[in-house]
Image: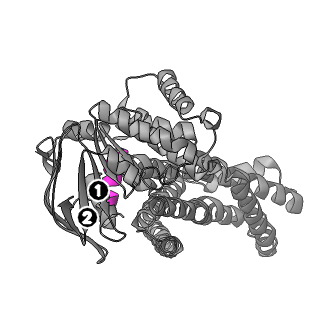
Amino acid sequence: MNLSLVHVSHTANDKAYIRDVNLIVEHGDCCVIKGKSGCGKSLLFSILSDIIRPDNGHVLIDGVHINSMSKKQYDDYKKNMGVIFQLPALISNLTVKENLLLPLNRYLTDVCLEQKENIVSQKCEEIGLKDYLNKRTEHLSIGMASLVGVARATLLKPKLVIWDSPLNEVDNDWVDYELQLIQSMKNDAVTQILFSNRHVIDSLCSSRFYLEQGKCYAA
Amino acid sequence: MLRLGFIPFSYYVISDCFNFSSHKSISADVLFKQIKFTGVQALTLVITISFVTSILIVAQGFPILSSVGQQSLIFDILIAGIFRDGGPFIVSFIILARSGTAITTELGNMVVNKEIDALNAMGISIISYLVVPRVVGMFLSVIILMSYFMVSGLVSSFVTASMFNHMPLSSFTNGLLDKLTLLDFIIMSSKVSLSALIVALITCYHGLKVEQATTEVPQRNIKAVGQSVFSICFIHLCLTSAMIIH
C-alpha cells in the first residue's frame, strides 16, 4: 500500500501545525518520522491515520485521493490500515476480548462469532494475556494495555501500519516482541510509518524523515 | 472533536437509526447495554418515585375532594398526575438525570482518552457505533420506564384509596376507566418519546463536543443538562397546550 501526502498543511487549536508537507511512503517501506516535542508529530500522525482531514493538500492512498474514494474503497483502506496509539486507546467499558472483537465484527461480517473468538484467543495467547481475555481494560497495566492496542491494530493483518511511539509503554520483556513484530511486518512487505526518536527503531527503518516546526525533511 | 452543528448531527443520527440493521454487528451490544442501564436498572428508582407521588396525590387530594363532595375528581387528578402530565415529566427528568448525564460523561471521557480516535482509525462510525444505539436505547427504555411508572402509580394509589376511604377495586377501576381516554395515552407517549429522543441527542452531542481536556467534560455536562431541561419543559408545555386547545 502506497501513501503520499502532497502539499499538506493543517493548523489545530491555533497551536500545533504542519506546513506544506510532502511525503511518499512506498509499498513495503518502513519509515520513521522523528522530531522534537511540539514539532507537529501528533498532528501528522492524526492526518496519516485519517483521524483528521488536512485544511490544505491531498492524502493519496495507492494514488487515490482519500476524499474521492468510494465507500468500498474507503472500507478496504480502513480494513488494511492498523493504527497504534501512544496511549493504548482501548474502549474502556469493554473487556479485552470485546476490544479485540471490534475490528473483526466490523469487517468480518460473514465469519461466525466462534471463529472470531478463536482468532482473538490465539492473539491473546501470543501476547501472554489469555488470562485477561474477559477482564475490563482498567484491570490491565499500561504495558499490557499497549500490547492489546498493538494486537487490535494487527489482528486483521494490515498492509499499512502507523505506529505512534513504539516501545514506549511496554515492559522490557515485551520490547523484543515489538521489535520482532516490526521486523516481521517489514519482511512481509507491510508498509510501516513509525513515529519515534529511538535509535533502535531508526536502525530498523529504510527511510527517515525529520519534522521541524511543522515542515518535514528527508533525513 | 465533533465538527457538526446540532441540527446536521441530529439529522445524521436519525437517518442512521433507520439504517440500524446494516451495522447491527457492532451496534447491537451497545443497544442492549443502554436498554439495560436506562430501562432496567432504573426500575427501583422509578417505582419508588411513582409510589410516593401517587400516595401523596391520593392522601392529600381525597380528604379535600371528599369535604366538597367531589370524590370522583380524584380520578381526573390521578390521570393528570400519573398518565398525562406528571408521570411523563418525572420520567423525562429521571432519564436526563440518570442516563443523559452518564452519556455525556462517558462520551466526553472517550474523546479525552483517544478512544474515539481509535474507533475512527478502525473505520468504525462514531454515529453508528456510539450514538445511534444510545438514542434508540433511550427511546425504547423510556417506554419501559413509563410502564413501570403507570403500574406502580396505579397500585399505590389504589392501596392508599382503599386504606383511607375503603374504596373497592371495582369502583377504583371503573372510575379510572371512565375518565381515561385514548388522547391521554397519545399525549403521554408523545411526551416521553420526544423527550427521550431530544435528551439522547443533546447529551450525545455535548459528549462528542469535548475536545481534549478532562475539565471540559463537566462543562459540557452542565450545558447538556441545561439545554435538555429547557427542551423537556418546551415539549411538555407544547403538548399540554395542544391538548387544552383540542
Q: Viewer-proximal residue, B72 or A158?
A: A158
> Mark 1 belongs to which amino acid?
Ile
Determine the residue positioned at 29% across, 45% down: A205
Q: Which residue is mark 2?
A: A211
Q: Which quarter of the figure is the N terminus of chain A placed in?
A: top left
Q: Which quarter of the figure is the C terminus of chain A placed in?
A: bottom left
Q: Main secondary structure of the magenta part?
A: helix
Q: Chain of mark 2?
A: A
- Mark 2 residue element: strand
Residue B86 lies left or right of residue A194; in this view the side is right
* Dot label at residue B129: none
Determine the residue positioned at 37% across, 69% down: A37
In magenta, the rendered stretch is B9-18
Determine the residue positioned at 50% across, 49% down: A90
Residue B243 belongs to the span the image colors magenta: no
Residue A20 lies left or right of residue B50; in this view the side is left
Q: Viewer-proximal residue, A218 or A54?
A: A218
- Mark 1 residue element: strand
Q: Viewer-proximal residue, B175 or A204?
A: A204
**Residue A157 visible in rendering:** yes
- Quadrant assignment, res A53: bottom left
> Mark 2 belongs to which amino acid?
Leu
- Residue B186: give x, y in percent of width and height: 49, 54
Q: Which residue is mark 1?
A: A33
Mark toward the start of the polypeptide (1 vs 2): 1
Instruction: State whether residue A194 is above or below residue B218.
Output: above
